[in-house]
Image (cartoon, rainbow, N blue to C red):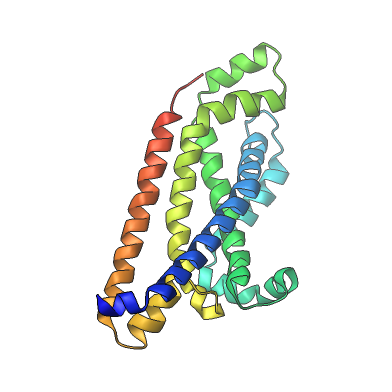
Amino acid sequence: MERLIELAPQILKALSQTFYMMWWTLSIAAVAGIPLGTFLYLIRPGSIMEKRPLYLVLDVSVNIVRSFPFLILMVAIIPLTRFIVGSSLGTNAVIVPLSISAIPDFARLVEQVLLEVDRGVIEMAVSVGANTFQIVWRVLYREGRSGIVGAATMISVSFLSYSTVAGLVGGGGIGDFAIRYGYYRYEPAVMAFTVVLFIVFVQVIKTIGRIAAMHLVKRI
């Protein structure tokens, strides 16, 4: 316990770095992933804006990015990361590969959520003259909002674990703290403490996501 108290400033700094990475990653993933997932749903075969060739191109592109192991992706796009943030090291640099990896994952989950929306509700909206924007905003998103929150929760948990490799590019965070103090310095207590922190974070994220989804489950 004395050692953990001694390391409290470093722990708080690592926590703030992790929160910073997660906030920006999830914000970017939501801003880009929800529209992309919606567009994939709208143009898929049999949907209301069917564009089969374009869907196939986007579908393959999304699958390719999703198939990259995060560590390999992070190294592969170092030139792009340097171009965007001016450096390939640091917390901001980690956000770039995290976001690139999160966007297609979130988009695919959103597409699957929208596929679960009752086709009858969509057909009813079309029959009363609703345009595409109205169908998306007032039907798809309202019917699928609980599922979208669930998708965001899944992405949050997954990318919390991805953020642990931030130390490889000097990004900091809890994972980097665990490696530097718990592994390299052979301090099992510190390593155990960081594991407990991750478990608590995951449970908190899941609990918040579950409560939010339950409150949004009301149908139109």
Identity of the residue furthest to the top in this view:
128
| Residue 76 versus residue 104 in the image, above or below | below
Residue 28 placed where, x, y %? 62, 53
Residue 118 placed where, x, y %? 50, 23
Give the quadrant of the N terminus. Answer: bottom left
Q: Residue at x 32, y 75 (%)?
A: 5
Identity of the residue furthest to the right in this view:
83
Q: In terms of depth relative to the viewer, which is nearer, 165 or 211? A: 211
Write down the quadrant of residue 63 in the picture. bottom right
Q: In terms of depth relative to the viewer, which is nearer, 192 or 153? A: 192
Q: In terms of depth relative to the viewer, which is nearer, 84 or 190? A: 190
| Residue 62 versus residue 45 in the image, above or below | below
Q: Residue at x 72, y 45 (%)?
A: 54
Residue 26 placed where, x, y %? 55, 53
Write down the quadrant of residue 79 in the picture. bottom right
Q: Residue at x 65, y 72 (%)?
A: 77
Q: In this view, does 17 lie to the left or right of 28?
A: left
| Residue 201 versus residue 183 in the image, above or below | above
Q: Which residue is drawn at 54% across and 61% down?
A: 20
Q: Is residue 158 left or right of residue 193?
A: right
Residue 211 placed where, x, y %? 38, 37
